[in-house]
Image (tube, helix red, strand yellow):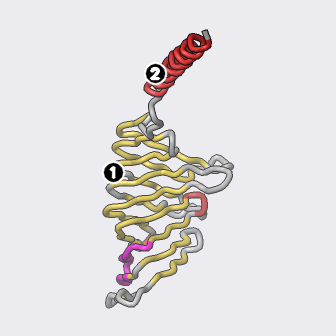
Amino acid sequence: MINRIVVLSTLLLAFALSINFVLDEAEESDEQPLRNEPDLYMLNATIEQFDNDGALQHRIDASRFTHFPLTDLTTMKSPIMDLAHAQERAPWNITAADGRIIPGSDYREEVVELWNNVLATRSGNEGRFINIQTDSLTIYPERNYLETDAKVFIDNETGRTTAAGMKAFLDAGRFMFYSTDGDRVTTIFLPN
């Protein structure tokens, strides 16, 4: 009698465990791992950002925008960015082959990263201009601030400056250049 109870209990326990195992396995197969797949894309679109006073802060045109919800990043193909200037001077026009937008939050400001053949230009009065060429550029639109650790070439009507990297405070019109042991800051002036 005791043997029957032990055998029956063992069979009942084995049956319950096998049913539990099968049900757990079925639930696991239904769950897909989270993937950072795009939730939206736009072709030949424009994004405009305005400041708190309603003035245009920047405009970005791109052949393709793709938003990834898990990381909240928006990638861009062939972006063209117009960065407005606080003193109502001509805006900066910045182009690249690729880029991404990292949106602002309570803990960070909005950042636009551009790479592959970056060119930033601004034209002024009386033939004045500035061209900045580099492989990558990080833009903080709210502060009109640019930076790069990549080699940079700056051309204007008076000459050319090359450096290992740069910080540019656009509202103040101030540039800081980096050098390395193998890459010094050099400026070549054009004759008048």
Q: Residue at x 35, y 88 (%)?
A: 182
- Which percent across, then down, holds residue 43? 36, 37
Distance from Cα at disc 2 to Cα at disc 1: 45 Å
Q: Residue at x 60, y 58 (%)?
A: 142
Between 189 and 79, which is closer to the camera in this rendering? 79
Between 119 and 112, which is closer to the camera in this rendering? 112
- Which percent across, then down, holds residue 68? 46, 41
Between 142 and 70, which is closer to the camera in this rendering? 70
Residue 119: in magenta span: no
Q: Earlier in the sequence, mark 2 or mark 1?
A: 2
Vertical arrangement, residue 26 with respect to residue 124, above or below = above
Assign the N terminus to one quadrant of the image: top right
Q: Residue at x 48, y 47 (%)?
A: 73
Q: Residue at x 36, y 64 (%)?
A: 119
Question: What residue range appears in magenta?
Answer: 149-162
- Which percent across, then down, holds residue 22? 46, 20
Disc 2 residue type? Ala
Name the magenta segment's main secondary structure: strand
Disc 1 residue type? Ser
* Residue receiving disc 1: 78
